[in-house]
Image: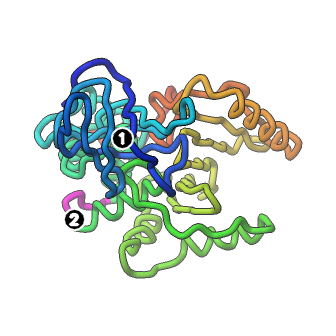
Amino acid sequence: MLAGPQPFSLRLDRPLGSGFRVGSLVSVQVLERLGSGRWLVSVRGRTFPVSAEVPLEPGARLLARVFRAGGRILLRVAEPAAQAPGQSAPGSSDRIAASFLAAGLNPRPEAVQKVQRLLERLRLPPKSFSRLAALLLEKGVDLDSPGIAALLADLAYGQSGGRGRRQARPWPRKSEQLADELRRDVRKTGGGEAAALPLFNHLQAGAEQWFVIPYSYGELCGTIRLRRQAPALQADRLVLATDGPWSFVLNRKAAGFRLQAVCAELPPSPRARRGWRRMAQKLQNLGVETDDTIRGDEGFDGFSLPGEAGPYQRVDTEG
């Protein structure tokens, strides 16, 4: 799909416009070649002429991050967002199998291939969607059902391949108000595109249950992912996924909580690092331990950190 070195930049002939935040991931589709080194691309339904450092292929989908350099907005391409139907991205099956193990599932070849076909058909990056698809299988959801694309878009709200930004709510003045709003979001059973999301949150399989709650407050959007463990059914992990390069993992410990930061852009900018230190200090004053090291997102599937032992006692080795 691509030639030349990666990553590389796409230089836009005109501004992206409103709704694109620096640091956010976007899916870019190459539409046609305009001339020497210039291409027409589509981003979130809008078309833009761009200049590319490498040859592109019409029809290719790319995963890019919005960033600013020298007063200009650029798209930094890190990887193809998906391959053409029938062509698997290198290592995608390994990533899918790893997501099965992290979820405590047996990575049977036919199940891994089914997830791989789904992601190829919907043109979704395995890095962000393998674990989500594994969770759907774990909860007994048919990956061939007509509403699967809409459900995945809600589960990955704010990310590349997820559903676009909803109308943002103002930040609540009190933490109790925020908690009440999130409880209503989990319990609501409305119809329409998001009708499958409450059902997903209701379904439980095995010893753990994940709840996924899309949010949009001010300029920040993404999903809150909450894990509840049996037999006590006590919440022991919260993952805050954002539409930018940052994710935060809060774990319940024997005494208190511990927060870890994950960043897709390492090393973080000095400003981002200072912001993390200020937030970490405030959390420590509230009794929350923080990890001094900012982790890269390689191997992070949006739910489990790399190197963590999965719930192997639940792996079904028979079926």
Q: Which residue is mark 2?
A: 145
Q: In the drawing, does residue 49 fall left or right of residue 225?
A: left
Q: Do we see residue 111 in this rendering? A: no
Q: Position of residue 122 (x, y in %)?
A: 23, 52
Q: Which residue is mark 1?
A: 315
Tell me where the magenta segment starts and ends, as one range. Answer: 140-145
Q: Position of residue 317 (x, y in %)?
A: 28, 39
Q: Quadrant of the N terminus?
A: top left
Q: Secondary structure at mark 1?
A: loop
Location of residue 159 with respect to 89 vertically, above or below = below
Q: Could you say which quadrant of the image residue 314 lies in? A: top left
Instruction: Using the image as rendered, state which of residue 208 and residue 290 is in the foreground.
Output: 290
- At a point 22% along the width and 42% down the height, the residue shown is 116
Q: Do we see residue 83 in this rendering? A: yes
Give the mark nearest the N terminus, 2 or 1: 2
Q: Secondary structure at mark 2?
A: loop
Q: Residues within 10 Å of mark 1 (few under 14, many from 20)?
A: some
Q: Between marks 2 and 1, how big is the CA–CA gap?
A: 25 Å
User: Of the numbered discs in the image, which one, if any, rests on residue 264?
Assistant: none
Location of residue 171 with respect to 235 vertically, above or below = below
- At a point 58% along the width and 62% down the height, the residue shown is 216
- At a point 35% along the width and 57% down the height, the residue shown is 152
**Mark 2: which amino acid?**
Ser
Q: In the drawing, does residue 310 fall left or right of residue 294?
A: left
